[in-house]
Amino acid sequence: MRALHLAIAATALLAAGQALAAGIDLSKPYGDKYGCINRNGQEVAADKMLLLTDKELITAASACTFSDKQPQADGSLVVTAKCEAEGEEGQAPTKFTIKRSAKNAKKLVVADEDGHVMGEVARCK
């Protein structure tokens, strides 16, 4: 009976570890080609740019600072942010969903609150 309890406990720990591993880790930046090039400041001009860090989402035309991150049961991450758009005054609240790409598990897909995909990003090297 004791062996059965140990096996159940080991299975539960393994499942918890796998669920944690499936979560999204933003401790290192993710970006598209130009997002990664510009991760330390505007180094090259780009009409299309996407950079995702643990604190913000930056595009060619906007900068969003995260105020809350909520991990979801499906492994995705819902982020609440305040965004400043180029040429506009003030900040607008918005939400993003970040999830693993169905095509490549090493990439993340960023979608706005309406579900429109903003882009796919990979960990910056």
Image (spheres, rainbow, N blue to C red):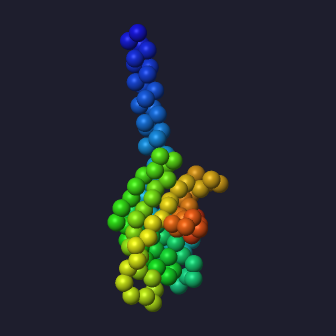
Query: Taking 9 as reference, is 64 above or below it?
Result: below
Work out which residue is located at the far bottom of the displayed protein and give it.
Answer: 87
Q: Nearer the viewer, residue 109 or 73?
A: 73
Q: Which quadrant of the rendered structure holds the N terminus?
A: top left
Q: Residue at x 40, y 24 (%)?
A: 9
Q: Residue at x 62, y 53 (%)?
A: 102
Where on the picture, by quarter, is residue 79? bottom left
Could you tell me residue 52's position as x and y percent? 46, 66
Work out which residue is located at the far top of the displayed protein and give it.
Answer: 1
Q: Is residue 28 visible in this depiction of the protein?
A: no
Q: Residue at x 41, y 13 (%)?
A: 3
Give the left or right position of residue 34, taking residue 3 as reference.
right
How many numbered badges does the structure rendering display? 0
Work out which residue is located at the far right of the displayed protein and give it.
Answer: 103
Q: Is residue 51 visible in this depiction of the protein?
A: yes
Work out which residue is located at the far left of the displayed protein and give it.
Answer: 67
Give the left or right position of residue 26, taking residue 115 as reference.
left
Q: Nearer the viewer, residue 49 or 63?
A: 63
Query: Taking 6 as reference, is 59 above or below it?
Result: below
Could you tell me residue 80's position as x and y percent? 40, 65
Q: Nearer the viewer, residue 15 or 112?
A: 112
Q: Residue at x 45, y 66 (%)?
A: 95
Could you tell me residue 81's position as x and y percent? 39, 69
Q: Nearer the viewer, residue 33 or 19?
A: 19
